[in-house]
Image: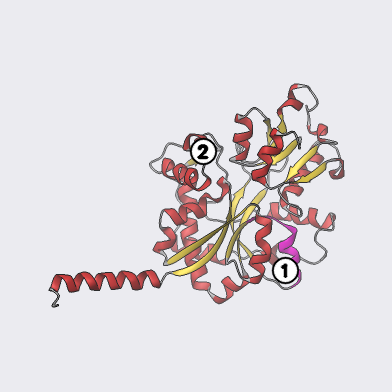
Amino acid sequence: MRCTRGQILALSMTALCSLAAQAQDKVNLAATTNTGDIGVFYAIDKGFLRAEGIEANLISFDTGAKMVPALATGELDVGTIPGSAGIYNAAARAINNRIVADRSRSAPDDMYQTLMIRKDLIDNGRFKTYADLKGLKVAVAAPGISILSIVNEAAKKGGIAYNDIEKVFIPLPQQVAAFRNKAVEASIMIEPFATLIAAAGEGVRFASTYDFNPDGQFTYMVYSEKFSKERPDVARRFMKAYIRALRAFNDATEKGRWKDTPHTEELIDILAKRLEIPAPRIRATFPHAVDPDGRVNMRGMQIELDFFKQQKMVQSPTIKVEDVVDLRFVEMAVKELGPYVRK
């Protein structure tokens, strides 16, 4: 059968599209089930990664701490994780995963991360001040993570010791049920779980963690050593897409609340779909703070590391914050994108 010129052109275009699809660089990307991952969700769903020739294989974890071993082996290229003793201990063993960008941090007016107290303890007067954390069961997502440092800062605010507080390790999604079942009495809680607990009348946002941990650097983007060393150009392009997403998100928030912008509803709809939570409930949450250029708060990281060393969670006395941070991909992305101008 003889093809017409138009048919040949159509077939050629199809072949080119197929080749383009095959040429996409695949990146194994791990994320958790909370609103803090809007940066990676938006970079995927808005097409920023695709525009950089990248196809993301998104893998869900219930806590970022579980990503660390897979990053160490190179099974994961990118992960979004809380600060942890694990990344410092890995660096001490010459496993060079690196914190490469901000994911969420503390800021004035920010209620994304809060000290959540069970409502009945507020109502009956058992809990009134930070000192009343003494003896309480406080939920923490996993051992060895930065939330433990935040618990320590809350204890200091109340004039009590870190060991005066009982820590109960429960992944964040399961903490909602733990409040309902009265299995725990408090938590360092983030969104969307804080809003779900408050809306159910089971917990009260006692205070933003900014009140006692103003330099808090909550979570990070991490590159595996294999990814950054063996595929640096893909790592650079990935970061460019991510910074574009962070800037769009930052434009949609102001003083810890969602703004009315042309793409705010788009961001909320993406979170609603990804987290399987109705959009109105997402709209009611408090968005997190993040640096629109992706730079991390080194002072907050130092507070974490000092805590990990004090608690013997990090054994190496010589390991430094600078040993686990690599901002060159952020700097390349910012140089290419230009200065951030808030819209």
- Location of the N terminus (image quadrant): bottom left
Which of 91 and 16 lies nearest the eye of the viewer?
Answer: 16
The answer to whether marks 1 and 2 mark residues whose Cβ atoms lie closer than 8 Å is: no
Q: Position of residue 11 (x, y in %)?
A: 23, 72
In which image quadrant can residue 306 be found? bottom right
Give the magenta range.
81-93
Q: Residue at x 60, y 73 (%)?
A: 226
93 to the left or right of 43: right
Dot 2 corresponds to which residue?
282
Q: Residue at x 42, y 65 (%)?
A: 52
Which of 205 and 277 lies nearest the eye of the viewer?
Answer: 277
Instruction: Report how far apart the C-alphas of labels 1 and 2 lie in the structure.
Output: 37 Å
Q: Position of residue 220 (x, y in %)?
A: 62, 56
Magenta-drawn stretch contains 177:
no
Residue 105 higher or lower than 225, as above or below: above
The main secondary structure of the magenta stretch is helix
Which of 328 and 237 lies nearest the eye of the viewer?
Answer: 237
Residue 181 higher or lower than 220, as above or below: above
- Secondary structure beneath label 1: helix
- Amino acid bearing label 1: Ala
First in residue order: circle 1 vs circle 2: 1
Residue 124 higher or lower than 186, as above or below: above
At label 1, counting other C-alpha atoms closer than 10 Å, the crowd grade (few under 14, some 14-19, many 20 or more) is some
Dot 1 corresponds to which residue?
91
Residue 188 higher or lower than 310, as above or below: above
Which callout, 1 or 2, points to the residue nearer the camera?
2
In which image quadrant can residue 183 be found? top right
- Location of the C terminus (image quadrant): top left
Q: Position of residue 18 (x, y in %)?
A: 33, 71
Which of 140 and 288 lies nearest the eye of the viewer?
Answer: 140
Q: Residue at x 21, y 69 (%)?
A: 10
